[in-house]
Image (tube, rainbow, N blue to C red):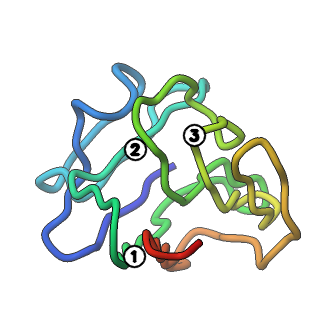
Amino acid sequence: RGGAAGGGSDTFDPARGSSSGVAYSNGNMTVSSITGSNTLAVVSGGVSRGKKLWEFKLEKDSLNDECTCFGVTTMPITKFSYDAPHCMMLRGYNGALYGRNSQGGARRKVHPGDRVGVLYDGDAK
């Protein structure tokens, strides 16, 4: 389970995500889960207004049993899971969208080698 961040100058911020179970490398551009428990890695560049695009590459995960999710979260983080009330996530395993305690329709599943873009629009109503 590992992903690489992209979003301009943003890197993963070890102080904002899970306090254990996550390994950072490549100048905090790469993150790997090193536990079987839920973990969350957060990038350094937050946004509240305007638009921001982050791009990620899923470098390693279990093919057809992917545990990696991609998305955005509000702070503070109170639960380290794709279905947390503060998260809006695309779950790689089934391609489903999760957000604010609800599940949306499935999209394409995410497999190792795939790239995922996450667009946040802080001005959308």
Discs 3/2, front:
3
Could you say where residue 51 lies in the image, as x and y percent from the top left? 37, 79
Identify the residue at the far right of this view: 105
Q: Residue at x 84, y 54 (%)?
A: 103
| Label 2: how many Cα within 10 Å (few below 14, some 14–19, many 20+) | many
Could you say where residue 124 lies in the image, as x and y percent from the top left? 53, 76
Residue in front for this viewpoint, 63 or 4: 4
Label 2: which residue? 32
> What is the C-alpha distance between the residues marked 1 and 3?
20 Å
Residue 79 vertical placement versus 75 (above, below): above
Could you say where residue 92 lies in the image, as x and y percent from the top left? 69, 61
Give the quarter of the figure containing the C terminus: bottom right
SS label for mark 2:
strand
Q: Residue at x 49, y 55 (%)?
A: 72
Query: CB of mark 1 within 8 Å of CB of mark 3?
Result: no
Which is nearer the N-term, disc 2 or disc 1?
2
> What is the C-alpha distance between the residues marked 3 and 2?
22 Å
Label 1: which residue? 55
Using residue 63 as the reference point, say whether residue 41 is left or right of it. left
Label 3: which residue? 86
Report the amino acid beneath label 2: Ser
Residue in front for this viewpoint, 95 or 74: 74
